[in-house]
Amino acid sequence: MTTLEDCRARDAADPLRPLRDLFTIPADVIYLDGNSLGVMPAAAPARIAAAVTEEWGQQLIRAWNESGWFDLPQRLGDRLARLVGAQPGELVCTDSTSVNLFKVLSAALKITAEDAPQRRLVVSERSNFPTDLYIAEGLCRERGFTLQLVDEPGQIAALLPETAVLMLTHVNYRTGAMHDMAAISAAAHAAGALAVWDLAHSAGAVPVDLNGGGADFAVGCGYKYLNGGPGAPAFVWVHPRHAQRFWQPLSGWWGHAAPFAFTSDYRPAPGIARYLCGTQPILSLTGLECGLDTVLAAEPLGGMAALRTKSLALTDLFIALVEERCAGHGLELVTPRAHAQRGSQVCLSRSEGAYAIVQALIARGVIGDYRAGDAQMPDILRFGFTPLYLGFEDVWHSVEHLRGVLATEEWRLPEFNQKNAVT
Ligand SMILES: *Cc1c(COP(=O)(O)O)cnc(C)c1O
């Protein structure tokens, strides 16, 4: 049986422990929602203030050159590339995940329309994040493709011979289940389909090897495990074999080969730069830079591999403590137990009160979130574990609060049963 003292000893021996000081974490909060909005890097307020007062305030238009505003999407992309198994020059930070998915899906459909016009399916999972499905649905309508959703990953293989693009999210937002990117991409390629991956719950959370994993296109989110701030720019990666091949559909001037030549015709920039569209949000990119700094600060301490080891230790401990200390309270583990099939979050289900239990935990300072169920999936209590700023003692206390909320039934209070707009 694990004790509070054991947890404290593990924190004391944790080589990643000093990284916690890179963040401003509110007192009395245990933050288990870094998979939805990462904690603020301590450096962010001063860095963003300097971008406002010094760069915007004093340099004005000169800052595009003098403070490197112009190539910020590429500079951040080159640094982020290291976290996802990509090379410098293959990735840019820009726009939102939804918008970037539209661009890459469109490019992927153009490639198959040319190489294999008989393939008319875009395949994804019904449990994928809704915006991914909505974007795919819209594009399929426009281009005359059919979006085919599967309920089980095992149903994908039979569809691949007719599939133009297989579009999957690497780590499922609701269950925390992780796909084997290399095996699935290889199966897609063997059958003649392209593989588009969404790394929203992977980048900065689990090691990703885009080049080694055989992906064709990828997008990901800046405000989750990358701690880039609310609505931070997302990222887009294209395998070099496809990068030069097509215009992306939002052919704006920032993706032009020579934006300041102001020619009347569009000529795409070489490589990934063509996936930019218009003038970039410099203040938001500055926030993202602070977030990337926090993840890259782990590099001298073992980088993503060390973060992954700690993340698995935290989620293993959470699962074990919930099973030991909350037994008999009707909680079920939804996230796969196998390490190879788990991201950096743990999801629990309960037939009654999932939303209210999360609200009662938040009132106690333990911030997780709730995702509503549907025909396929029960209501879920979702807990994200960011190894950069969470410790083993945090896990202990969060489980104790969960036990308290269940044992006292305080979740039944009316104030915890009123739904907010954002869950
Ligand atoms: C969070 C998330 C998004 C978010 O998309 P936005 O365009 O930033 O709103 C998209 N896809 C997945 C899988 C996500 O988890």
Image (cartoon, rainbow, N blue to C red):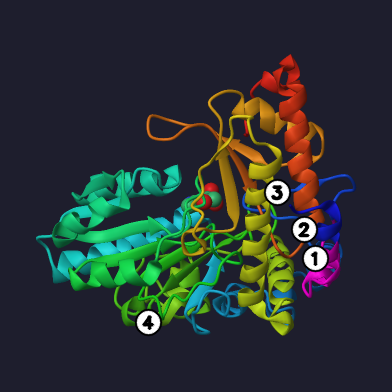
Asked if marks 1 and 2 touch (Cβ < 8 Å), the reply is yes
Please identify, in this view, whether the residue under mark 2 or under mark 3 is nearer the observer: 2
Residue closest to the eye, 312 or 222: 312
**Crowdedness near tag 1: few (<14), some (14–19) or many (≥20) residues, C-alpha within 10 Å:** some
- Quarter containing the C terminus: top right
Bounds of the magenta segment: 9-24
Q: Identify the mark nearer the N-term, 2 or 3.
A: 3
Asked if marks 3 and 4 touch (Cβ < 8 Å), the reply is no
Asked if marks 4 and 1 touch (Cβ < 8 Å), the reply is no
- The disc labelled 3 sits on which kind of residue? Leu
Q: Quadrant of residue 117?
A: bottom left
Q: Identify the mark nearer the N-term, 4 or 2.
A: 4
Residue closest to the eye, 61 or 125: 125
Residue 173 in view, yes or no? yes
| Residue on which disc 1 sits | 10
Please identify, in this view, whether the residue under mark 1 or under mark 3 is nearer the observer: 1
Give the spatial CA distance, label 4 vs label 2.
Answer: 41 Å
**Percent x, y for residue 152?**
31, 47
Q: Residue at x 44, y 69 (%)?
A: 275
**Crowdedness near tag 4: few (<14), some (14–19) or many (≥20) residues, C-alpha within 10 Å:** some
Name the element at disc 2. Answer: helix
- The disc labelled 4 sits on which kind of residue? Pro
| Residue on which disc 2 sits | 392
